[in-house]
């Protein structure tokens, strides 16, 4: 029988591995046990000769309600009164999806207003020139 590498899984800065396996392995990481936010999965493999390989995978957990905000961005410089629209909704479970409240209402983007005003202006110009040509 051939010797196999041993795989150790570490979460964040923990000194004790959360799991130890002989390779190859299929593993399900239950993120429900982790707090929301940034985490690091560190995978250390040790071959039968004692050499180690390390792979570090940063990831972010979002099990709690999703929060969306319209009106301010991260690291924005603001002044005066800033109107905000905030929405928070749960995603349900992996078996059930919550539809109500899962869409965030948004204000109409300024470029849409510019297109509408431009189209209305063009239509007015076309109407005025059409009527002036027809009356002559």
Image: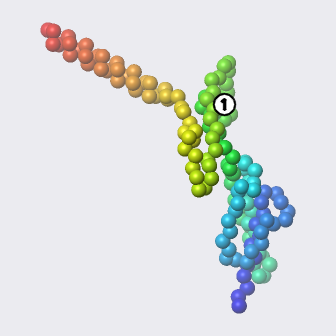
**Residue drawn 73% across the image and 60% down it:** 41
Residue in front for this viewpoint, 73 or 93 = 93
**Quadrant location, the N terminus:** bottom right
Image: 48 above or below 9:
below
> Image quadrant for the C terminus?
top left
Q: Is residue 6 above or below residue 43?
A: below
The reply, left or right, for residue 96 in relation to residue 10 is left
The residue labelled by disc 1 is 76
Disc count in the image? Answer: 1
Q: Residue at x 30, y 20 (%)?
A: 123
Please tell me whether mark 1 sits on a helix, a strand or a loop.
Answer: loop
Vertically, is 36 above or below 26?
above
Location of residue 16 in the rendering, given as x and y in whole percent from the top left corner? 84, 65
Badge 1 density bin: few <14, some 14–19, many ≥20, Cα 10 Å: few
**86 over 29 or under it: above or below:** above
Instruction: Give the residue displayed 62% in from the left and 49% down from the top.
Output: 92
The reply, left or right, for residue 120 in relation to residue 37 is left
Displayed quadrant of residue 94: bottom right
């Amino acid at each position: 029988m051939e010797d196999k590498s041993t795989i150790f899984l570490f979460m964040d800065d923990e000194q004790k591995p959360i799991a130890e396996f002989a390779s190859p392995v299929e593993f399900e990481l239950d993120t429900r046990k982790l707090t929301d936010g940034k985490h690091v999965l560190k995978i250390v493999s040790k071959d039968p000769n004692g050499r180690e390989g390390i792979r570090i995978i940063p990831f972010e957990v979002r099990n709690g309600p999703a929060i969306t905000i319209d009106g301010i961005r991260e690291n924005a410089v603001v002044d005066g009164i800033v109107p905000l629209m905030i929405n928070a909704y749960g995603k349900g479970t992996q078996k059930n999806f919550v539809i109500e409240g899962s869409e965030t209402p948004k204000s109409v983007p300024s470029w849409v207003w510019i297109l509408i005003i431009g189209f209305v202006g063009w239509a007015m110009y076309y109407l005025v020139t059409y009527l002036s040509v027809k009356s002559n």
